[in-house]
Image: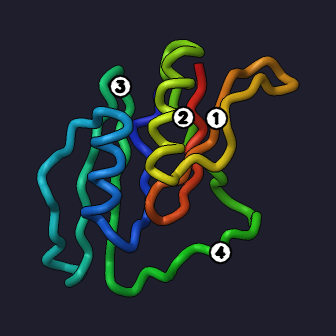
Amino acid sequence: MRLAHVALWTLDLDAAVAFWRRHFDAEVGELYESRNRPGFRSRFIRLPDGGAIELMARPWVEAASPAERAGWDHVAVSLGGDAAVDALAARCRDDGCLLSGPRRTGDGFYEAVIAAPDGTRIEITS
């Protein structure tokens, strides 16, 4: 068994696609517009070493609450090494989307946390 993909709602599909393309070199699939649910649009993105994310938008989606709540909290993307985490964290700091800088966690991970345009937290790990 393997995870096929995760899906994230976004308020701005184009901004979300640009974020994943810029920061993760994601390959972006064709735009899908539903005939059955007018206003629903999505695009799949594929990360260079595998993994897929479906970015979904529709006019009736509301902004997420920043408070912790039940459900998915973040997505973690392994970059393959500490230097890669440092480099992406620096680029995200410059772009204003770094939430917490690189650090070694108590359980041994080297990670930083960044935010996608809609605030979805993404852990970038070595």
Q: Please tell me whether mark 3 sits on a helix, a strand or a loop.
A: loop
The residue carrying pointer 3 sits among few (fewer than 14), some (14 to 19) or many (20 or more) residues within 10 Å by Cα, namely few
Q: Tag 3 or tag 4, which sits nearer the N-term?
A: 3
Pointer 4 residue: 65
- Quarter occupied by residue 22: top left
Q: Please, what is the three-letter code of the amino acid marked with disc 2?
A: Ala
- Spatial CA span between label 3 and label 2: 21 Å
What residue appears at the point 33 percent right and 84 percent down from the top-left corner? 59
| Residue 50 numbered tag | 3
Pointer 1 residue: 112
What residue appears at the point 67 percent right and 59 percent down from the top-left corner? 71
What residue appears at the point 77 percent right and 23 percent down from the top-left corner? 104
Label pair 2/1, CB-CB below 8 angstroms: yes
The residue carrying pointer 4 sits among few (fewer than 14), some (14 to 19) or many (20 or more) residues within 10 Å by Cα, namely few
Q: Tag 1 or tag 2, which sits nearer the N-term?
A: 2
Q: Mark 1, mark 4: which one is toward the viewer?
A: 1
Q: Is residue 16 above or below residue 77?
A: below
- Quarter occupied by residue 105: top right
Q: Mark 3, mark 2: which one is toward the viewer?
A: 2
x then y, percent, for residue 47: 33, 31
- Left or right relative to 78: residue 60: left
Q: Tag 2 or tag 3, which sits nearer the N-term?
A: 3
Q: Mark 2, mark 1: which one is toward the viewer?
A: 2
Give the quadrant of the C terminus.
top right
